[in-house]
Amino acid sequence: MIYCVEDDGNIRELIVYTLESTGFHAKGFENGNSFRQALEENLPELILLDIMLPNEDGMDILKELRANARTRQIPVIMVTAKSSEYDKVIGLDSGADDYITKPFGMMELVSRIKAVLRRANKKETDLDAMQIGNLVLDIQKHEVLVDGEQVVLTFKEFELLRYLLKNENVVLTRQQLLEKIWGYDFTGETRTVDVHIRTLRQKLGSAGKYIETVRGVGYRIGEKDES
């Protein structure tokens, strides 16, 4: 899913239409408030963010995204009429992954999006392993170790643990986990997540303590302060 934050209705509709026509799923938002509300529900793969929004500067939204552990890894392409080198440098230095100026061709935009997504996926692939305490998840070997001993997980359990570790110390709702691991079209209930979390904890043994239940919300993984 790609989110497009653009106050010009014609441009926004054209971008969403183009993305949908080229194999992406996309949603458009005319202001920062509606965009933030959508972020509470689901996180997109990439964000197209206009700088000049009504009553708000897109740069401030970018800074919010990069300051929040839940959203800081989402690729952002700034879309704006500002074309000076200074504006581009400010945008990139503030954490934007790319910068495209109006007017631009739709196919150029699609190419930029694909390039940014490739770079983002490569960054994740280049991360060979993730560790917390005595728990190690090796992405390349598709292996999980606890105290050096291998733990056999199903594919879904492995992906669930991997996603939790990727978002260490971030509370993830059951719905987020359900959609990310089982897919947007999955028709199961959030209880599916609870069952897998319980089994995962049991299999991880002493490392199961790192998975914390946040009552009424969901789950997060992190090392607890023993002091």
Image (cartoon, helix red, strand yellow):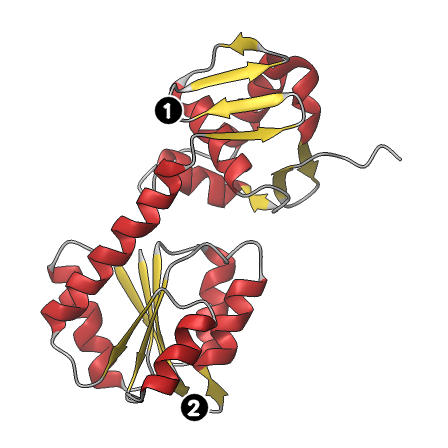
Towards the viewer: 97 or 58: 97
Q: Where is 5 relative to 172, above or below? A: below
Q: Earlier in the sequence, mark 2 or mark 1?
A: 2
**The residue under label 2 is which amino acid type?**
Pro
Task: Assess disc 2: are there few (<14), some (14-19) or many (≥20) residues with their C-alpha within 10 Å of its C-alpha.
Answer: few
The spot of residue 57 in percent (x, y) is 47, 85
Q: Is residue 187 visible?
A: no
The spot of residue 158 in percent (x, y) is 45, 23
Q: Is residue 143 left or right of residue 97?
A: right
Give the labeled residue for mark 2. 54
Residue in the image at 55% along x and 15% along y: 145
Towards the viewer: 210 or 41: 210
Q: Is residue 82 left or right of residue 133?
A: left
Residue in the image at 31% along x and 55% along y: 1
Residue 31: image quadrant is bottom left
Give the labeled residue for mark 1. 140
